[in-house]
Image (spheres, rainbow, N blue to C red):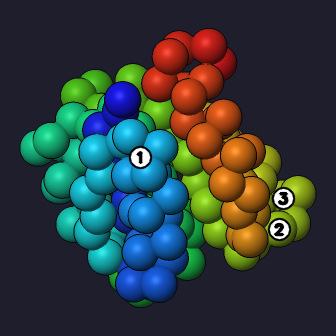
C-alpha cells in the first residue's frame, strides 16, 4: 500500500493512527514535531503525510505551507487531522496546501477512504 509519515506530537494519536493504518496495510513512520517532519519528508519522500495542526514550535499550518511550496515535496499529499473544527481552520489549512482536512475524532473508514483516494491520484 502506501508509505505514510505521521507528524504529530501526541504519542496517543500516533499510536492510534499507526495501528489503524498498519492494519490497513500501510507502512507507517512518525515524528513528534513539524521541524523534524519536514526533514523526514524531504529525506524519505513518503506517499502521504498526516499532519497535526497544534504542535509546539512550528505548527502544522506552517509545516504544510513549507512542504507544499518545496519543489521536492509539493506533490506529496498532506492530510491535516486536528481538533480545530472551525470552517476558517479548514479553509486556511487547504490554502496552505493540505489536500484534506479532517477533524478529530476521526472515523476510521473515512480516513482510509481519503488516503486511498489521495494515494491513487483520484483527488
Q: Secondary structure at mark 1?
A: strand
Mark 2 or mark 3, which is nearer to you? 2
* Distance in Å between CA atoms under marks 1 and 3: 21 Å
Quadrant of the rendering where the N terminus is positioned: top left
Can you say whether 113 is above or below 91 in the image?
A: above
Can you say whether 69 is above or below 11 in the image?
A: above
Labels 2 & 1 near each other (Cβ < 8 A): no
The residue pinned by badge 2 equals 85
Q: Is residue 79 left or right of residue 10?
A: right
**What is the number of the mark on residue 88?**
3
Q: Residue at x 26, y 57 (%)?
A: 29
The residue pinned by badge 1 equals 49
Mark 1, residues whose alpha carbon is within 10 Å: few (<14), some, or many (≥20)? Answer: many
Q: Secondary structure at mark 2?
A: loop
Mark found first going from the N terminus, 1 or 3: 1
Quadrant of the rendering where the C terminus is positioned: top right
Amino acid at each position: 500500500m502506501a508509505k505514510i509519515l505521521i507528524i504529530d506530537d501526541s504519542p496517543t494519536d500516533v499510536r492510534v493512527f499507526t495501528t489503524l493504518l498498519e492494519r490497513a496495510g500501510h507502512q507507517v513512520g512518525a515524528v513528534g514535531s513539524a521541524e523534524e517532519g519536514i526533514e523526514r519528508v524531504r529525506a524519505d519522500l513518503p506517499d502521504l503525510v498526516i499532519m497535526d495542526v497544534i504542535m509546539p514550535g512550528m505548527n502544522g499550518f506552517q509545516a504544510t505551507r513549507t512542504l507544499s511550496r518545496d519543489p521536492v515535496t509539493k506533490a506529496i499529499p498532506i492530510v491535516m487531522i486536528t481538533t480545530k473544527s472551525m470552517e476558517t481552520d479548514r479553509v486556511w489549512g487547504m490554502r496552505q496546501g493540505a489536500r484534506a482536512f479532517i477533524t478529530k475524532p476521526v472515523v476510521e473508514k473515512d480516513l482510509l477512504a481519503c488516503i486511498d483516494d489521495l494515494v491513487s491520484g483520484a483527488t
